[in-house]
Structures are given as C-alpha cells and as structure tokens.
Amino acid sequence: MAAMAFVARARKTAILLLFLVLHDGCVGARPLDVAEALAKAKDVSVGKVGSNVKSFNVLDYGAKDDGKKDSSINFIRTFKAACNFHGDAMMVIPKGDFLIGPVIFSGPCFNPSSLIIQANGMVKAQSDIKYYTGGADATDWITFQSLKNGLILSGDGTFHGQGAHTWKYNDCAHKSKCVRLPASMKFIKVNDTIISGIKTVDPKGFHIFISVSQNVKLFNLNVQAPGNSPNTDGIHISKSSKIEISDSVIATGDDCVSLIHGTNEISIKNVTCGPGHGFSIGSLGHYDDEADVSKISVINSTLKGTTNGARIKTYKTDSPSKASDITFKDLIMDRVANPIIIDQEYGNRASTQESRVSISDIHFENIKGTSESKIAVKLICSKLNPCRGVQVKNVNLQYVGRPNDPRPFSSNCTNAKVTYSGIQRPPPCTPGS
C-alpha cells in the first residue's frame, strides 16, 4: 500500500510540476512550411540539426539510461526547458534504456518553429497497471497536448509499452462499455506535427492515438505487437482532419488504422498491415452526437493475414451520423479473411435496432490478391439507411481457404445500392440483393 501511495504521489507531483512551469497564453509562431519541416525531420532522424537549435538532453536533467530508475520527472523537466526556450529547441533522448511512467508534455511552447524531439534510445513504460490510475481517459503513457505551434518527433528510437503485463486486464471482448487500457502515445490538440522514424512495441492499449488535431504527418513508422494482443490499434484517430499516414509497417492485434467520429481528410498510402484487423472506418454510431466522417482514402497498401481488409463498421444504435467520400484503391490482399466489408450490424447482430449511420459515395477499386473466406465481398447495410453510391471496380480475388468448403466463391449484399465495372472476382451481388 505504501508503494502504491508513493507511485500515486510521484505521478501527481510530476504532472503538477509540468503544468506549473508552462504558460497558458497564446504564443506566436511561424506558419508550418511542410517542405522545410519534412527536411528537418529527415535531418533529425540521423542526428543532423543546425547550430541555431539549442539541444536539451534528458541525461543533463538527471535521467538514467540504465532502464531501472524511473526518469519520468527528468523527461518532464527536459521538455519544460525546451518548450520554454525562446528560440529553436530540441529535446534529445539519446541511445540507452530509459524507464518512465505516465507523463504529459503540454504546451503551448515559446519556440518560434516546431519543437523537435529526437528519440534514439529505448524508452520503456512502467509495466504495473497501478501507475495508470483512473482509466486511460485519465492516464495514457506519453501524452502530447496543446502543441499548436508544431512538433517534430523523429529518430530511430523505440517506445516499448510493456503491454504484455497488462493485456489480461482488457475486458472489451466481454463489455461494450469497457475501460480501454492506456495508449502508448496520445496526441491531443496538436497541430502541424510530424512523427517519423520511431518504433512502437507492445502497447497496453493503442499504439498511437490522435484526437482534436490538424495537419499531422506520420511516416516511416514501425508498429509492432502480437496478433493476439487485445485492442492494440496501430493508429487510432478521432475528431481530427488533414492527417497523412504513409510508408509504414503496422503489425498488431487490432485495427492497423482505425478512424472514428469526426475524422476528415485522411490519407493512408504505402502501408503494410498485418497481422491485425485491417483498415477500419469505425466503429461509428457508438456515441451520441457523433460528427460525420468524410474524405478518406486508403491507397497503394498491402494487407497480410488480417481478419479484415477494407472495412466500414457501424453499431446498431440510435446515434445518427454520415460516412461519405471514402476510397479504398490499389490494395493487395494476402490471405485476408474479409477483404472487402461494410458491416452495419457490428457489435450486436441479434438486435432489432437498425444503424442510423448513413453510408454513401464509397469506392472499392483495383483490389487484388487472396481471400480466406468464400464470401470475399460483404456489403451488409442498414435497412433504415441503405448504403448509397457504392462503386466496386476491378476486384480480382482468389480463394485460398479450406479446400473442402463446398460453397461458391461469392459476394453478399444487403440493403446496398452497388454499381460494378471491370473485373469482378468473386462475381457481384445479384441485382436487388
């Protein structure tokens, strides 16, 4: 009990100190020059920065690289010093093993350009769930918030969530209103941000969670967790716009990328997904007064051994919203269980309630590879709100599942208005289905 009390006091002290030293007022900064920021992120990833950038190394603020001593407060002090510096600044996590509990890196900052965090070391989370009090909505592991002037997180470092110690506490498979486990990295109210080069391993909950943010670019990421790890979404996004995810590998136990309510102008390209649950729009219709989802594109990507490929899923609830202008294009399916799926009966198929999420203007184009299911295309829509404007063009899949399955290789459509063109393998749904 004494140890638990000490942990709680230490955590509260660390967060309190962080908020005491950061100011709440608005701080002016140069508008983000995307090309300049991308070039800077590339330089940072190999340790190259200009002499005009002041470096703040966590070792200089007392952090220990032995992987044993908790360095939470030392990371916070380093961030505080960099954030409060009236000039270009970089927080450095050098080679070495660092152990930290939950920390909050909060702005706004005083830097005239994007604050840089160069992460080259191994950063491990405290494994004991007792460090993360109040559920994940109160305590994630590493939280970046209110950084509206820009952030560049780059390097070849690893963030290890040590989630295997806590996955047994996940009860979301049995409870619809479960408490999610802590995300490894949460970005809330961050704008003009670049996340590049880093590796995230075995989170307790989500790997990366982005919410209420704009203009975020994620690329060259390596996201890893076992295929049976529960609710370890690779990149989970809500209430955000203008997010780009590219040139990354995501292998995890849940959705590789999940986009829920209020996501708009999202681009996913050149991503390898698997194991995992695929690329998912949803679940939608889970909360009251959900904002709409639109302008989503998933292109030129590969799915390997996933339970789903291109998926839209909604609950059967009274919560109305819209999902529109969504494109899945140039995708390769490698032994995927459900390559193409719209599922408006997600979560409770036995319920007589119909989903009130309206789905329209959906494009599945140039999708090829192999399916482990005899029903490779499933478009199961709401009777109350039939799917409109669904276009299926050039789908070329082959069945590679159980050889003794006597059923034909087929599509299944319910309450969906679909138009077809080009190659159709499996055969399209019959008209009126």
Image (spheres, rainbow, N blue to C red):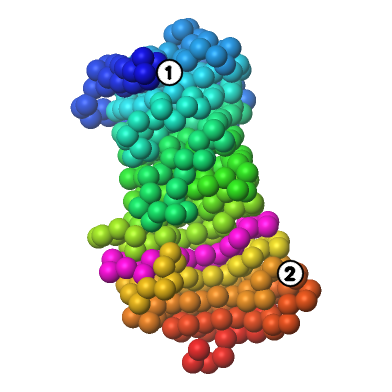
Location of residue 25 (image quadrant): top left
What x and y, as percent, mark residue 182? 43, 37
Prevailing secondary structure of the magenta residues: strand
Quadrant including the N terminus: top left
Name the residue rendered at 54%, 70% in the picture. Answer: 341
Q: CA distance from mark 1 to mark 2?
A: 49 Å
Query: Which of 134 and 253 lies nearest the eye of the viewer?
Result: 134
Residues shaded magenta: 301-328
Q: Amino acid at mark 1?
A: Ser
On whether residue 104 falls in the magenta region, the answer is no
Query: Which of 229 and 239 lies nearest the eye of the viewer?
Result: 229
Residue 267 lies left or right of residue 114; in this view the side is right
Q: Is residue 32 visible?
A: no
On whether residue 314 falls in the magenta region, the answer is yes
The residue at which mark 1 appears reads as 72
| Tag of residue 133 | none
Of the numbered discs 1 and 2, the one sitting upstream in the chain is 1
- Considering the numbered disc 2 on the image, is that residue within a helix, a strand or a loop? loop
What x and y, as percent, mark residue 185? 45, 35
| Mark 1 crowdedness (10 Å alpha carbons): few <14, some 14-19, many ≥20 | many
**For discs 1 and 2, the disc positioned in front in the rendered view:** 2
| Tag of residue 401 | 2
Q: Is residue 260 visible?
A: yes
